[in-house]
């Protein structure tokens, strides 16, 4: 009798709401019924309000049920779940769910579908084709394909990925490195973790292609210690890829060599900055390096180094497999391809939504996210992590695009959107940004180290109603100017975005009349 395949996520988000207990209950319940089952532990599809979402493979399709608790398992089995039978928790085909059907999944095409530790399953769902094509190409042609795709860094600044690769390719050096920045620390973001836990081979393939493109033979995945599940999965996947011949001394029996190693960070936010990350890998305190020289010229161990975010590297296999034009066909303006957008905070339908650039902020929050989970009006959203700007509802027509956000003094960053309802105190949010910068500063530059501390103190005076509010706000503005233009890295340089956007768009929370908002200095 053929075993029935059940798919249960082992993603950290699903585990947090009981997925392990659900898997155990399924094993026990099926055994009691004499029903042979194979439980495949997948990643999550990213519909977090439905987790744990389990799927059963019927003769024709996969049928989803969720959210399923361990107590739901016996009633589901009694109702005939193993054959896809009706039940109040039955969701039907996952791909038909509106949250998934509206997406354009290029980077996350396999998440929640494949066994994340099976190179063969990955290959059976279209994996390794980009690597095969890259091996047959000249390095400069691989780089040119990435340039033509329009792929930009998905970690913050949106710098063209291909240009970074070209610089490293042309840089002289006997040893070169590929470094994956998996130090995902922005509030409301989880896309890197989802890839590493649900489809790690796409990252391994992307890094290997990058190595072949620039002449690097060694790669490092730098993951924060707060991601133990991702660390375990990536390490196991690297071992499996090496055993299968996809990395090592001869990549798929080609002349190319490329191997990978995981390095675990200690959770310092500043190590998300590429040069502080390099310092950490080298065994030193995570402090920002002055630039130039750029890492592409002199990076890890003083060698030419490509540093890319998880999402940037995970997009590369599609570009090589399907062609640069196929990737560039998606997007908006200068922002090409797709962006995995993460909806979090006080939102009804929290999760990962991958789509081409260009959707408006209002569509993402109100339509796709469903508004607030509390049912109260949305007052503000923060886009781009703890150092991203706060956008009020009147700016919800802003397209999700690097240039459109920059034109309104905002950042896309890593694609996280955190939603707040009308109970939020924006003065407290501005203070949090200053305090966050003060705590996470590496201490190397004065504007970041001292300016953020003084900023938190001044906002405290405003909140307590002490002194001249206008004078305090003028001082905050001056501090923000110093932080923005005097800091060595984006930690201090971006802190003004949340602070000044809170003052500009929500002056009433700082004891100032709404009418002065347009005159608040930028």
Image (cartoon, grey):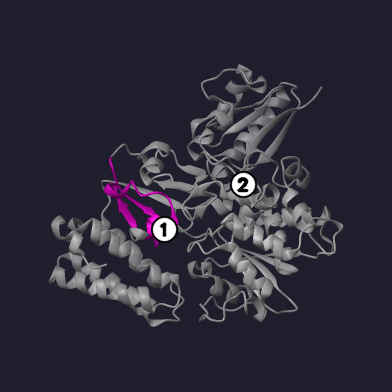
Residues in magenta? 377-406
Question: What is the crowding at mark 2: few (fewer than 14 residues within 10 Å), some, or many (at least 20)?
Answer: some
Q: Nearer the viewer, residue 134 or 389?
A: 134
- First in sequence: mark 1 vs mark 2: 2
Q: Quadrant of the C terminus?
A: bottom left
Q: Secondary structure at mark 1?
A: helix
* Image height of 294 relative to 393, above or below: below
Q: Does the stretch in magenta take in 382?
A: yes
* Image height of 512 relative to 359, above or below: below
Q: Is residue 27 left or right of residue 11?
A: right
Q: Is residue 399 left or right of residue 36?
A: left
Q: Is residue 29 left or right of residue 474?
A: right
Cα separation, mark 1 vs mark 2, equals 22 Å
Q: Does the stretch in magenta take in 115?
A: no
Q: Secondary structure at mark 2?
A: helix
Q: Residue at x 69, y 22 (%)?
A: 60
Q: Is residue 506 left or right of residue 20?
A: left
Identify the residue under disc 1.
403
Q: Residue at x 60, y 32 (%)?
A: 54
Q: Residue at x 38, y 78 (%)?
A: 449
Q: Nearer the viewer, residue 505 or 4?
A: 505
The percent position of residue 405, horizontal first and vertical second, equals 38, 56
The percent position of residue 432, horizontal first and vertical second, equals 33, 63
Identify the residue under disc 2.
326
């Amino acid at each position: 009798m053929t075993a029935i395949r059940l798919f249960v996520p082992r993603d950290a988000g699903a585990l947090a709401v009981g997925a392990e207990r659900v898997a155990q209950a399924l094993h026990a319940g099926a055994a009691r019924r004499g029903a042979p089952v194979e439980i495949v532990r997948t990643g999550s599809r990213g519909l977090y309000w439905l987790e744990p979402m389990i799927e059963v493979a019927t003769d024709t399709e996969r049928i989803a049920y969720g959210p399923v608790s361990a107590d739901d398992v016996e009633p589901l089995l009694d109702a005939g779940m193993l054959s896809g039978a009706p039940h109040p928790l039955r969701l039907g085909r996952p791909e038909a769910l509106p949250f998934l059907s509206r997406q354009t999944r290029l980077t996350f095409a396999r998440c929640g579908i494949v066994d994340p530790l099976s190179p063969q399953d990955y290959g059976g769902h279209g994996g390794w084709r980009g690597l095969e094509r890259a091996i047959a190409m000249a390095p400069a042609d691989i780089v040119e394909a990435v340039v033509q795709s329009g792929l930009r860094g998905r970690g913050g600044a949106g710098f063209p990925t291909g240009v970074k690769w070209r610089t490293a390719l042309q840089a002289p050096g006997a040893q070169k490195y590929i470094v994956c920045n998996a130090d995902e620390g922005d509030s409301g973001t989880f896309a890197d973790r989802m890839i590493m836990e649900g489809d790690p081979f796409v990252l391994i393939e992307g890094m290997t292609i990058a190595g072949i493109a620039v002449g690097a033979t060694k790669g490092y995945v730098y993951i924060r210690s707060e991601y133990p599940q991702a660390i375990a999965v990536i390490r196991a996947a690297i071992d499996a890829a090496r055993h299968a011949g996809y990395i090592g001394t001869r990549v798929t029996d080609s002349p190319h060599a490329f191997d990978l190693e995981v390095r675990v960070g200690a959770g310092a936010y500043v190590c998300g900055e590429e040069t502080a990350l390099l310092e950490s890998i080298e065994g030193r305190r995570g402090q920002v390096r002055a630039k130039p020289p750029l890492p592409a010229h002199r990076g890890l161990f003083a060698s030419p180094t490509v540093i890319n975010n998880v999402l940037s590297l995970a997009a590369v296999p599609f570009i090589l497999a399907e062609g640069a034009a196929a990737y560039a066909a998606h997007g908006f303006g200068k922002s090409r391809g797709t962006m995995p957008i993460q909806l979090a905070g006080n939102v009804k339908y929290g999760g990962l939504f991958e789509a081409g650039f260009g959707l408006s902020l209002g569509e993402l929050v109100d339509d796709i996210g469903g508004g607030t989970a509390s049912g109260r009006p949305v007052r503000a959203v923060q886009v781009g992590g703890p150092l991203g700007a706060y956008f009020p509802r009147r700016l919800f027509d802003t397209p999700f695009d690097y240039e459109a956000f920059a034109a309104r003094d905002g950042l896309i960053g890593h694609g996280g959107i955190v939603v707040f309802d009308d109970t939020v105190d924006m003065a407290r949010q501005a203070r949090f940004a200053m305090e966050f910068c003060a705590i996470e500063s590496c201490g190397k530059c004065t504007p970041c180290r001292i300016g953020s501390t003084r900023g938190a103190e001044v906002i405290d005076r405003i909140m307590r109603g002490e002194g001249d509010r206008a004078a305090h706000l003028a001082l905050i503005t001056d501090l923000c100017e110093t932080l923005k233009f005097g800091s060595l890295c984006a930690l201090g340089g971006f802190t003004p975005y949340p602070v000044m956007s809170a003052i500009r768009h929500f002056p009433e929370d700082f004891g100032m009349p709404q009418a002065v908002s347009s005159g608040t200095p930028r």
